Image (cartoon, rainbow, N blue to C red):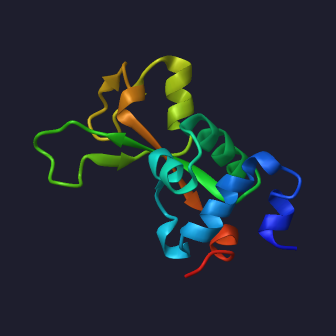
Amino acid sequence: MSLYDEFVSDNPQIEKFFCAILDRVRARACEYLTVPHLCKISGVDAVDVVRFSGYLSDVGLFETHHALLRDDEDSNEGDNLVLLEPGVVEDARNVGYLVDPYTGEEIVDWENDVVTFYRGTDRLKGALRP
């Protein structure tokens, strides 16, 4: 059974989004899929992209990741994006602040500094063009 048949045939709301991924994303390019990028390629609004991406994560086709955008004048270009360990964002939501993994600083207004992105799993990559 194809991924399309398995995940879209019983969920027509996700069809446009999922078909856009199958048609427009190559396997080697699905390591860093952001909400704006997924909106652009699918024509689906951000709220639905987040909802559909959550569904694809739940069924094992996406992995959800987070990164912290650091505003550090001393860092080199590209060093301002710090991948966060699994569970860090959930912990931050529970305690009300995020701990910068490099400085240990508590960031109270952290939600604007965190980027959510998705990675296609090997199962999804197997269905995409190389």
Residue furthest bottom as drawn = 130
Where residue 66 sits in the image (x, y, percent)? 47, 44
Residue at the image point whose x is 55% and y is 74% from the top: 27
Q: Which of the two residues, 114 or 36, is positioned nearer the viewer here?
A: 36
**For residue 128, which quarter of the picture?**
bottom right
Q: Is residue 59 above or below residue 106?
A: below
Q: Is residue 10 above or below residue 25?
A: above
Q: Which of the two residues, 113 or 45, is positioned nearer the viewer here?
A: 45
Q: Is residue 54 left or right of residue 94?
A: right
The quarter of the image holding the C terminus is bottom right
Where residue 107 sits in the image (x, y, percent)? 34, 24
**For residue 100, which quarter of the picture?**
top left
Q: Is residue 45 above or below residue 60?
A: above
Where residue 37 sits in the image (x, y, percent)? 46, 52
Residue at the image point whose x is 48% and y is 52% from the top: 40
Where residue 87 sits in the image (x, y, percent)? 56, 38
Residue at the image point whose x is 79% and y is 66% from the top: 4
Q: How many marks?
A: 0
**Residue 121 in view:** no
Q: Is residue 74 left or right of residue 112?
A: left
**For residue 1, which quarter of the picture?**
bottom right
Residue furthest front as drawn = 43
Residue at the image point whose x is 45% and y is 46% from the top: 36
Q: Is residue 76 above or below residue 121?
A: above
